[in-house]
Amino acid sequence: MVTAPGGRPAHGSATLAAQAAALLAAEHNERGRVPVLAIDEAHLLTHHQLEAVPILTNAEMDAVSPLACLLIGQPTLRRMLRPGVLAALDQRIAIRYPMPAMTAEQTAGYLTHHLKLAGRADPLFSSDAAALIHDAARGLPRAGCNLATQALVAAMAGRKNIVDEHSARAAVTEVTAD
């Protein structure tokens, strides 16, 4: 946050936060641009780390914010923000968007898209395998990806050219076993 606009990080969290806030405000004032900080996997941040976010966005007593911050995370992030300890951050969140689960068609398209990115143009998952992966993953992309990977391993172990329902069932068993 400090080095991107050309600063040299100071030592000490209070000094560093003030330095980052000043550099962000300067970026905003000089160039008329609002820097965007995207924090992926924000649900993995500690309370202490989350408490630092409002410091960066609190310029001129909330009259102007020199930084747009995206907190991207699992549903646990929402629960983490509820306690009064993080009220300052929770109150600054202008837009909340819970990503809905994918439909069965979207899951199949998601699998096809990832296979195309990997260089596979023809189908690799049977429709019943894709449907089973969708149902077991409850439409959640990461869970579907994990199940699809396990289904690929199961199909390879069975020397199959296509991931069929049997391979998908083996994947579900493997992933959900205690």
Image (spheres, rainbow, N blue to C red):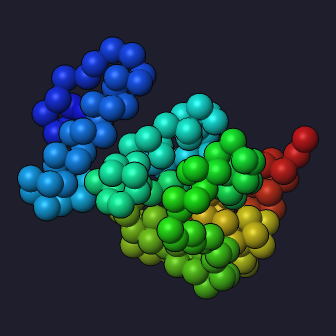
Can I make out residue 15 in this image?
yes
Q: Name above or below for residue 89 compared with residue 21.
A: below
Q: Give the farthest residue toward the right.
A: 178
Identify the residue at image location x=46%, y=64%: 114
Report the front residue among 95 and 25: 25
Relative image position of residue 89 (x, y in whole percent)? 56, 51
Identify the residue at image location x=21%, y=31%: 3
Residue 119 in the figure: left or right of residue 83:
left
Report the front residue among 42 and 57: 57
Can I make out residue 126 in this image?
no
Relative image position of residue 9 (x, y in whole percent)? 26, 22
Q: Name above or below for residue 144 compared with residue 50.
A: below
Report the front residue among 4 and 171: 4
Identify the residue at image location x=58%, y=50%: 88
Report the front residue among 35 and 127: 35
Q: Name above or below for residue 6 compared with residue 40.
A: above
Residue 34 in the figure: left or right of residue 170:
left
Relative image position of residue 74 (x, y in whole percent)? 64, 55
The image quadrant that residue 133 belongs to is bottom right
Identify the residue at image location x=16%, y=49%: 27
The image quadrant that residue 172 belongs to is bottom right
Where the C terminus falls, by quadrant? top right
Q: Give the farthest residue toward the left.
A: 30
Total marks shown come to 0
The image quadrant that residue 33 belongs to is bottom left
Relative image position of residue 56 (x, y in whole percent)? 39, 43
